[in-house]
Image: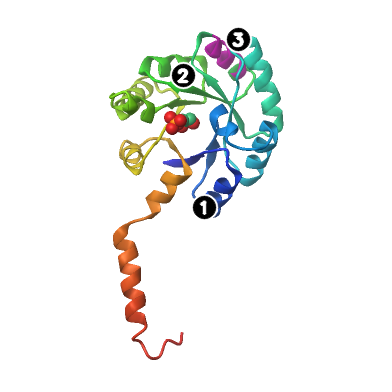
Amino acid sequence: MKFFLDTANIEYIREAASLGLIEGVTTNPSLISKEDKPFKDIIQEICKIVNGPISAEVTASDSKGMIEEALKLSEIHENVVIKVPITKDGLKAVKELSTKGVKTNVTLIFSATQALLAAKAGASYVSPFVGRLDDISTEGMNLVAEIQQIYRNYLFETEVIIASIRNPVHVLQSALMGADIATVPYDVLMKLIDHPLTNIGIENFLRDWKKVENKEI
Ligand code: G3P
């Protein structure tokens, strides 16, 4: 399973990249709004740090506007993937962009049939939002299983990015399901490293190490 980082924060991206864990980055307008830098500069900087797919989202609501924005964003770097919401105009834009060879990530997916349409339109990636489904008492990971089944049935090459991940259990479930990609917020990534027994183990080793007289290596 590939790990993408779900953030537009450059420091988080640098830190996660230094761990060798990050193979791509996903952003959205809300994540961009948290940073105090121009959109284009943020995407440019991310592309310098991570050599993998970097999702940048269009904000126009009509297909013509989406395509115009997408083409400008694609000029920033060859790794830029255009994030497009699943709407009628979004699908038109994805179809057009895929014929032009521009990679797309169809976002705000909340049903398996939306994911089916996105794949048929030629999406490179789809992003089901599992956490937001959990928020309304619907099992988000069930959606992922349905999408995986449909894509297997028809051999779609569209990759599934599990998005709106809120906790380590989402990551565990994603990996157990053989997900293509999990896009994780920085705090969730850090939680994956931590375990209280690891910390207690280190403390005990260091306490005992003090008793060793000759520590030379
Ligand atoms: O990349 C979009 C997605 O991951 C949003 O997550 O937590 O705002 O539902 P969240």
For the residue labelled by badge 2, is the local secondary structure a helix, a strand or a loop? Answer: helix
Magenta span main SS: helix
Magenta-highlighted residues: 89-97
Amino acid of disc 1: Gly
- How dense is the environment of label 3, judged by Cα within 10 Å: few (below 14), some, or many (20 and up)? some
Of discs 2 and 3, which sits in the foreground? Answer: 3
Give the residue at x 31% y 30%.
Answer: 141
Residue 119 - label: 2
Please tell me the numbered disc located at residue 20: 1
Q: Quadrant of residue 82?
A: top right
Judge whether residue 50 can be spotted in this image.
Answer: no
- Give the residue pinned by disc 3: 62
User: Mark 1 to mark 3: distance in Å?
Assistant: 38 Å
Q: Which mark is residue 175?
A: none
Residue 103 x, y percent position in the rendering: 58, 26
Q: Position of residue 217 (x, y in %)?
A: 46, 84
Where residue 2 sits, quadrant-wise, is top left
Left or right relative to 194: residue 38? right
- In the image, what residue type sits under mark 2? Ala
The image shows residue 96 at horizontal and vertical percentages of 61, 14
What distance separates the C-alpha of mark 1 from that of mark 2? Answer: 30 Å
